[in-house]
Amino acid sequence: MKQKFNVITSTCVPLPLENVDTDQIIPARFLKATTREERFFGDNLFRDWRYHADGTVVKDFVLNDPTYGGCILVAGKNFGSGSSREHAAWAIAGYGFRVVISSFFADIHKNNELNNFVLPVQVSEDFLAELFRTIQETPGTLVTVDLPAQTVTNTATGRSEHFEINGYKKHCLMNGLDDIDFLVENKSKIEQWEQLNK
């Protein structure tokens, strides 16, 4: 979903597991869908961890725990490894997450998140460990992600870290633009360049 991104302050959903791959994010059997239905993919985010084979809820999985909520997912190191399926980013966005915080992202998945208006925020392992501790101790902990300033702040401790983001992707997120929108926005400049370089 195209949404402009500026500053988000939210509670968090903690997923302190390392090496979460795209098949765990959205199992392969859901890749046969012929439409990109946000609700469908969001409902099946972490499907095999959220539900038993008979469809009943796995009560102790974090997405099924009413203690936690919000639009920020805090995940362990090496998030989004495995196959390059964009469906994993569709599922994260479809569920309603706007931000994923981790100490390391698989490159292709990181770009897929950015292309789907989800901001991947890479932090130090120490900062990530502090976030997990704080959220566990106080589930209502708020985290502020400031895209213009490129900072993430644990409001419970006051600690902030700077994160990196490609300048083009930052512009697109802040203005709610996908790659096509960006080209259309710059159509006159492209035409002018073409005229000058005939």
Image: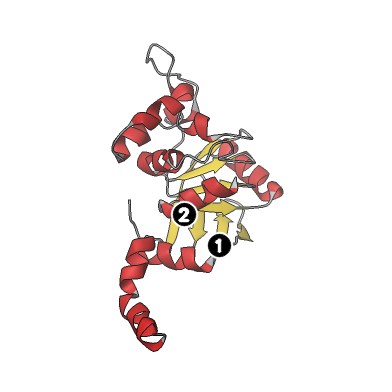
Q: Is residue 65 visible?
A: no
As drawn, the label of residue 105 is none
Q: Nearer the viewer, residue 182 or 142?
A: 182
- Rendered position, 160 above or below 37: below
Question: Helix, strand, or loop for circle 2?
Answer: helix
Q: Which of the two labelled residues, at mark 2 and mark 1, occupies the earlier sequence position?
A: 2
**Mark 2 to mark 1 CA distance (whole Å):** 10 Å
Question: Which amino acid type is marked by label 1?
Answer: Ile
Q: Position of residue 27 (x, y in %)?
A: 46, 27
Residue 193 x %, y %: 39, 83
Foreground of the two, 112 or 135: 112
**Can you name the residue that lies furthest to the right here?**
126
Within 10 Å of disc 1 (Cα), the crowding (few <14, some 14-19, many 20+) is some
Left-right relation of 116 to 166: left
Q: Which residue is mark 2?
A: 114
- The numbered dot on residue 165 is 1
Given contact means CB atoms under 8 Å apart, are the residues at marks 2 and 1 in contact?
A: yes
Q: Residues within 10 Å of mark 2 (few under 14, many from 20)?
A: many
Residue at 35 percent of width and 69 percent of height:
183
